[in-house]
Image: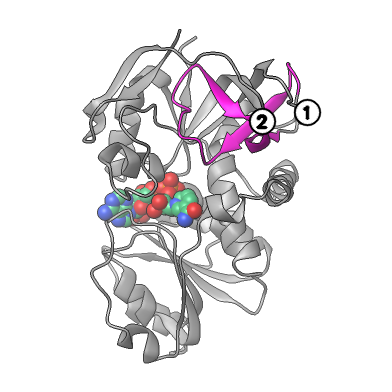
């Protein structure tokens, strides 16, 4: 038995119960990981609430899709890692809000020893997502002007830094002045505080009426149509999250007016093949080690206090990444 979180019914942060969890022993192809740090992602909120049924595990479940730690046992036929290895994982399976857990060995990646577990757990999920957005889904370069919502959030902070490093012109949106300061530090050439300014008007002003090449939209319902309106002729709408809920049904004219392209990328699908997972995580950790990406592990909570972490994330009180530290 280890200590961890169990969810018996979907709902608010209070449905996450701190309990003894029986995780068992690793079977063929599996490892047991002792978690040093656990990343919190907005996807964990959707799962706790029971949104996106195709992604949610059946009740009862232990939430969490990211952690960094040390391998403490391996099952038969594991060849990719050994006891004592320092590794991390991001994505499926959903199970990381515990002190220890069982994982398929082919889902973990090695972490360079120079990267602290808190930083690894703060960056892997969000950084692989940023990799999808700026390196796989598109190869961002100096010719691009991009719009990034939630520019001071976990994924947003990394997308802005990475796109800036690749030479793009970055326009970020945030809700307040404090977040605007961070977004500027993270490479936004222009920051729009959307509670004070109209996003579409400002984008058109900044781009001299042309619009942006790519709109990265992680907000959904509240921003979808605005994002499309910010795009140039033949621009790309990248809808990769729904922090405000799913957009209302959209009229095709939103896309046909400017011959827009639309995509809805998933980090988990882009890194499903092990070689893609390894290549992307290597490039990510390399950029962290070189200082191209500064990882903002701005909020740390004991694992048992995860309800407060979810409350703060949903209330938009956080910037950068949220990390849970196992109590033992
Ligand atoms: N497709 C994928 O594979 C993939 C993978 C990872 C994450 N994601 C998505 O990426 C997004 C960011 O994830 P994250 O973990 O880094 O979270 P985050 O960006 O740190 O937190 C969410 C931010 O969204 C903004 N926001 C705007 N409207 C909101 C609303 N109604 N409710 C809550 N927040 C709102 C807030 O920033 P402001 O205060 O500045 O508005 C808030 O801080 C999420 O939508 C997530 O689902 C997608």
Disc 1: residue Cβ within 8 A of ligand 1's nearest atom = no
Q: Residue at x 40, y 79 (%)?
A: 230
Q: Residues within 10 Å of mark 2 (few under 14, many from 20)?
A: many
Q: Which quadrant of the figure has residue 145?
A: bottom right
| Tags 1 and 2 touching, CB below 8 Å | yes
Specify which label sits upstream in the sequence, 1 or 2: 1
Q: Position of residue 229 (x, y in %)?
A: 35, 81
Residue 238 lies, with reference to residue 284, above or below; the image says: below
Q: Which residue is located at x 25 percent, y 31 percent?
A: 13
Decide if residue 186 is in sight here.
Answer: no
Secondary structure of the residue carrying tag 2 is: helix
Residue visible at 38% across and 84% down? Answer: 255
Name the residue nearer the viewer: 46 or 169.
46
State the mark number for residue 79: 1
Q: Position of residue 70 (x, y in %)?
A: 66, 20
* Corner quadrant of residue 161: bottom right
Residue at position x 28%, y 76% from top?
A: 250
Asked whether residue 86 is drawn in magenta, I would say yes
Label 1, label 2: how far apart the Cα atoms are: 8 Å
Q: Is residue 261 left or right of residue 223?
A: right
Q: Residue furthest right?
A: 79
Q: Is residue 45 magenta?
A: no
267 in relation to 215, above or below: above
Residue 174 drawn above or below residue 118: below
**Residue 47: assigned label:** none
| Residue 288: x %, y % from top left | 68, 44
The residue under label 2 is 105
Report helix, strand or loop for mark 1: loop
The N terminus lies in quadrant: top left
Residue range of the region highlighted in magenta in the rendering: 82-110
């Amino acid at each position: 038995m280890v200590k961890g979180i169990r969810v018996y019914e979907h709902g608010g942060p209070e449905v996450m119960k701190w309990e003894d969890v029986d995780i068992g022993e690793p079977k063929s192809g599996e490892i047991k990981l002792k978690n040093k740090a656990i990343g919190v992602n907005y996807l964990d909120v959707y799962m706790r609430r029971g949104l996106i049924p195709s992604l949610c595990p059946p009740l009862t479940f232990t939430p969490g899709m990211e952690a960094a730690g040390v391998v403490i046992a391996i099952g038969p036929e594991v060849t990719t890692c050994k006891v004592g290895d320092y590794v991390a994982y991001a994505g499926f399976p959903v199970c990381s809000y515990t002190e220890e857990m069982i994982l398929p060995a082919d889902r973990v990646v090695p972490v360079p020893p120079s990267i602290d577990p808190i930083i690894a757990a703060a960056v892997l999920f969000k950084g692989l997502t940023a990799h999808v957005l700026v390196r796989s889904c598109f190869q961002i370069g100096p010719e691009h002007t991009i719009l990034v919502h939630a520019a001071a959030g976990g994924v947003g902070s990394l997308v802005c830094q990475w796109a800036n490093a690749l030479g793009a012109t970055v326009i970020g949106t945030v809700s307040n002045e404090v977040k605007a300061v961070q977004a500027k530090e993270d490479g936004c050439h222009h920051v729009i505080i959307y509670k004070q300014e109209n996003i579409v008007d400002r984008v058109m002003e900044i781009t001299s009426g042309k619009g942006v090449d790519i709109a990265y939209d992680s907000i959904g319902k509240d921003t979808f149509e605005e994002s499309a309106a910010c795009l140039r002729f033949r621009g790309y709408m990248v809808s990769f999250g729904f922090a405000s809920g799913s957009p209302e049904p959209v009229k095709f004219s939103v896309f046909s007016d400017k011959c827009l392209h639309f995509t809805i990328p998933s980090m988990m699908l882009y890194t499903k093949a092990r070689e893609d997972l390894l290549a992307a995580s290597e490039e990510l950790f390399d950029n962290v080690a070189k200082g191209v990406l500064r990882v903002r592990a701005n909020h740390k909570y004991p694992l048992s206090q995860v309800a407060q972490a979810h409350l703060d994330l949903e209330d938009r009180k956080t910037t950068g990444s949220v990390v849970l530290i196992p109590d033992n």
